[in-house]
């Protein structure tokens, strides 16, 4: 492709806005201060296949902060689906996510490999206030414990939660880069189409 003036200007504009997005992200990383605002463990005992637990209250002091949940569950040869809600005690508003943990394991090359039982979740632009966490779990392990299956009666499902405020959200940065790159991609496609049509027209004129 010939580097026309328009094409060079397009590249310069793209690199300018991409550099600007990178600088903004670096600035936000330098400005944000991570702080642990909650850390606790919820335990689910004998009962039905679904159970519900509520954490202690904690406070998010900064306005419109990003909060990351670090999650870790203890499971043995089973799975559990957690529905986790961040609830504002002031106005009752909540945000909900689901995470599934699978620790059934599988055999590969005669070695039993366990699947991971940790995960994370992000909540963006969380207002300052007092919060608590509601967790509902669904797992066949709880039903087995209820039925006093000797294989599972000593097991509990534990969910460790650590909430960290001030964490950057990289998805916004990559979304900005994606949106910035759309116009150059469209322009290059249109340029190639014009070039192709131009040469087709010339070939047709020569044949005539």
Image (cartoon, grey):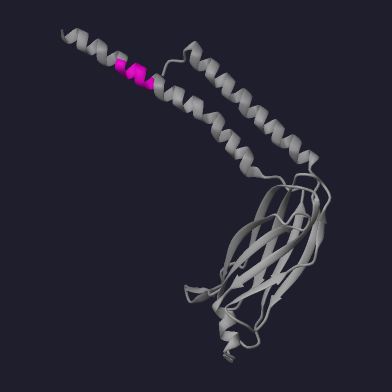
Q: Residue at x 70, y 36 (%)?
A: 25
Identify whether 168 is placed above or below 80.
above
Q: Nearer the viewer, residue 54 or 155?
A: 54
- Which quadrant of the view contains residue 170? top right
Identify whether 167 is placed above or below 195.
below
Q: Quadrant of the C terminus?
A: top left
Q: Is residue 65 left or right of residue 49?
A: right
Count numbered badges in the picture.
Answer: 0
Q: Quadrant of the N terminus?
A: top left
- As for residue 67 lying within the magenta part, the answer is no
Identify whether 9 is placed above or below 173.
above
Q: Residue at x 78, y 43 (%)?
A: 32
Tell me where residue 164 appears, x and y as whole percent. 76, 55
Q: Nearer the viewer, residue 202 or 148?
A: 148
Q: Nearer the viewer, residue 89 or 185?
A: 89
- As for residue 194 lying within the magenta part, the answer is yes
Q: Residue at x 52, y 16 (%)?
A: 8
- Residue that lies at the very extreme toward the front in this rendered image: 91
- Which quadrant of the view contains residue 130? bottom right
Magenta region: which residues?
Answer: 192-197
Identify whether 170 is placed above or below 206.
below
Magenta region, main secondary structure: helix
Q: Nearer the viewer, residue 70 or 125?
A: 125
Q: Residue at x 58, y 20 (%)?
A: 13
Tell me where residue 89 appears, x and y as whole percent. 77, 58
Tell me where residue 167 appears, x and y as whole percent. 73, 48
Tell me where residue 57 appears, x and y as whole percent. 80, 63
């Amino acid at each position: 492709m010939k580097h026309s003036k328009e094409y060079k200007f397009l590249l310069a504009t793209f690199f300018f806005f991409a550099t600007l997005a990178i600088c903004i992200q670096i600035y936000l990383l330098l400005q944000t201060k991570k702080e642990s605002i909650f850390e606790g463990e919820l335990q689910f005992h004998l009962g039905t296949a679904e159970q519900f637990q509520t954490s202690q209250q904690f406070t998010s002091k900064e306005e419109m902060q990003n909060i990351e949940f670090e999650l870790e569950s203890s499971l043995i040869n089973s799975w559990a689906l957690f529905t986790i809600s961040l609830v504002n005690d002031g106005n009752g508003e909540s945000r909900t996510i689901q995470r599934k943990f699978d620790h059934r394991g599988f055999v590969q090359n005669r070695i039993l490999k366990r699947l991971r039982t940790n995960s994370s979740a992000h909540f963006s632009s969380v207002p300052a206030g007092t919060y608590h966490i509601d967790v509902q779990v669904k797992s066949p392990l709880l039903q087995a414990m209820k039925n006093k299956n000797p294989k599972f009666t000593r097991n509990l499902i534990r969910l460790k939660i650590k909430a960290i405020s001030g964490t950057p959200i990289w998805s916004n940065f990559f979304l900005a880069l994606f949106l910035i790159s759309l116009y150059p991609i469209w322009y290059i496609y249109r340029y190639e189409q014009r070039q192709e049509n131009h040469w087709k027209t010339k070939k047709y004129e020569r044949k005539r």
